[in-house]
Amino acid sequence: MNLIITCARNLESETKNEIRKILDELGDQEPEILNVGMRGILMVNTIIEPSKIIDWVKNKIIEEPWLIRYCLRIIPIQRITDTEIDKIKQNVIKLKDTIQKNDSYRITIEKRNTSISSNEIITEVAEIFPNKVSLNQPDWIILIEIIGNETGISILKNDELFSLDKAKRMSD
């Protein structure tokens, strides 16, 4: 899986259709789109590079703001692992070279359907990086998306995430 899509509860089927149309337009006629057993969340596996999808959607919002209605957030996922602190840390280590020596970072954890400790994850992951932390304007976001037993991990620039609310505010 390389994308997490969030939507309003009970609008998963409309969101599936919307993301399917987007991916079809970008050249993926057979994406795998899964309900994860939680309202308002879909996981997607596509052959299209997530950054290309987000750029396309952001441009569409400017050109045709009514076209994107159901995909509230589009979140690129670079690695998937079990929801265990050691495995999460190992996977962050595999991505750590993205962040350069003088770059700042922030760790963002989104938890759904789990009791794992956010503070414990932050402590373990922060040990990997000697860099400066910036909660307000980091160069990089270490994003840890926990969905039950599975965890998606990415190290992203702020503009590599898509939020429908933010995009529509910026296009006004």
Image: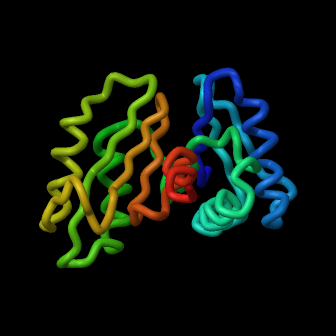
In the rendered image, the vertical position of residue 88 relative to residue 115, given as above or below: below
**167 with respect to 115 (left or right):** right
Q: Report whether 141 appears left or right of 54.
A: left
For residue 118, what is the image quadrant?
top left
Quadrant of the frame with the C terminus: bottom right
Task: Give coordinates of residue 122: x percent, y percent.
Answer: 21, 44
Residue at screen point 47% across, 31% down = 149
Please say whether residue 75 is visible from this viewpoint. no
Q: Residue 43 location in percent, x, y?
A: 63, 42
The count of marks equals: 0
Work out whether residue 142 can be spotted.
yes
Residue beneath the point at 13% across and 65% down: 132
The residue positioned 73% from the left and 37% from the top of the image is 15
Relative depth, front residue between 87 and 56: 56
Q: Residue furthest front?
A: 172
Q: Residue at x 38, y 56 (%)?
A: 91
Q: Is residue 163 left or right of residue 126?
A: right
Q: Picture quarter containing residue 136?
A: bottom left
- The colour scheme used to paint the residues is rainbow
Q: In x, y percent, where is residue 12?
A: 71, 30
Examine the rendered structure and indicate whether residue 161 appears above or below residue 14. below
Relative to 110, residue 10 above or below: above
| Rendered location of residue 8, percent (x, y) | 61, 28
For this view, does 34 lie left or right of residue 51?
right
Which residue sits furthest bottom?
101
